[in-house]
C-alpha cells in the first residue's frame, strides 16, 4: 500500500507565534533567516466546532530549510504553545480531499481545513493523538515554491 504522503513533498516546518514580526526579526538575528512579506489571507475554515471565517497571517523563510511563521489566532488550532514549539510539518499533495481521507485512515484525524464552495480545499490539518500535526497543501496552488517565495520577498532584502 502506498503511504498517503511522500517524504520528498515536505517543504516547510510551521511555527505558530504570538507576534510574527518579532519572530521574523528574532530568527534573522539568531540564524540569518530572510523572510517573505507577511501575507494575510481571509478564509472559510472548518474546525471541530463548525465553520468560521478566519484571517490568517503568515510568512515563509526565503532560506532553506523553510520555516513558516503563523500569527496566533486564539481559540483555534493556530494557538501558540506556552513554550513555542514546532506546530506542523507542511507537505504538498495533488488532491487535498483524497489525501485528507487517507491521512484519517492512517490515524491522523482531520483537525481543520479550508472550505471553498462548501468542500475541503486549499489545505487541511491532521493531528495525530500524540500531537504530531501534518498540514497538506494543494500543490496546484503553489506549483513552483521557489518562484512563489521570490515573488513575496520584500524588495529591500
Image (cartoon, rainbow, N blue to C red):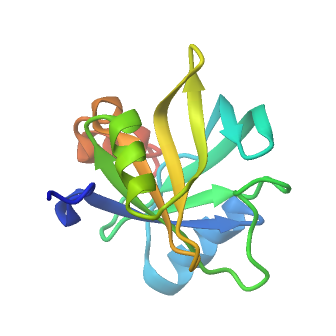
Q: Residue furthest right?
A: 75
The quadrant in which the N terminus is found is: bottom left
- Looking at the image, the residue that sits furthest to the left is 1
Q: Quadrant of the C terminus?
A: bottom left
For residue 61, side relative to residue 112 (left or right):
left
Query: Of 81 and 39, which appears nearest the observer?
Result: 81
**Front residue of 143 and 94:** 94
Residue 138, how many percent across, how many down?
35, 36
Image vertical order of residue 152 relative to residue 115, above or below: below
Residue drawn at 59 percent across, 27 percent down: 115
Which residue is nearer to you in this view: 78 or 129? Answer: 129
Within the image, what quadrant is residue 144 found in? top left
Give the side of residue 69 with respect to residue 138, left or right: right
The residue depicted at 53 percent of the width and 46 percent of the height is 37
Instruction: Inspect this view and state whether residue 157 appears.
Output: no
Point out the residue furthest to the top here: 117
Question: In the rendered view, would you say 99 is above or below 119?
Answer: below
Q: Position of residue 24 (x, y in %)?
A: 59, 66
Residue 44 in view (yes/no): yes
Amino acid at each position: 500500500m502506498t503511504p498517503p504522503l511522500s517524504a520528498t513533498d515536505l517543504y516547510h516546518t510551521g511555527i505558530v507565534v504570538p507576534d510574527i514580526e518579532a519572530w521574523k526579526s528574532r530568527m534573522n538575528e539568531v540564524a540569518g533567516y530572510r523572510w517573505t512579506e507577511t501575507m494575510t489571507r481571509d478564509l472559510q475554515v472548518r474546525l471541530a466546532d463548525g465553520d468560521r471565517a478566519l484571517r490568517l497571517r503568515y510568512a515563509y523563510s526565503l532560506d532553506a530549510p523553510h520555516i513558516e511563521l503563523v500569527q496566533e489566532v486564539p481559540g483555534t488550532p493556530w494557538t501558540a504553545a506556552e513554550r513555542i514549539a514546532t506546530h506542523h510539518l507542511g507537505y504538498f499533495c495533488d488532491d487535498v480531499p483524497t489525501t485528507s481521507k487517507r491521512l484519517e485512515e492512517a490515524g491522523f484525524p482531520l483537525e481543520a481545513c479550508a472550505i471553498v464552495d462548501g468542500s475541503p480545499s486549499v489545505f487541511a490539518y491532521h493531528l495525530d493523538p500524540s500531537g504530531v500535526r501534518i498540514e497538506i497543501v494543494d500543490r496546484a496552488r503553489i506549483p513552483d515554491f521557489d518562484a512563489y517565495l521570490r515573488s513575496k520577498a520584500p524588495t529591500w532584502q
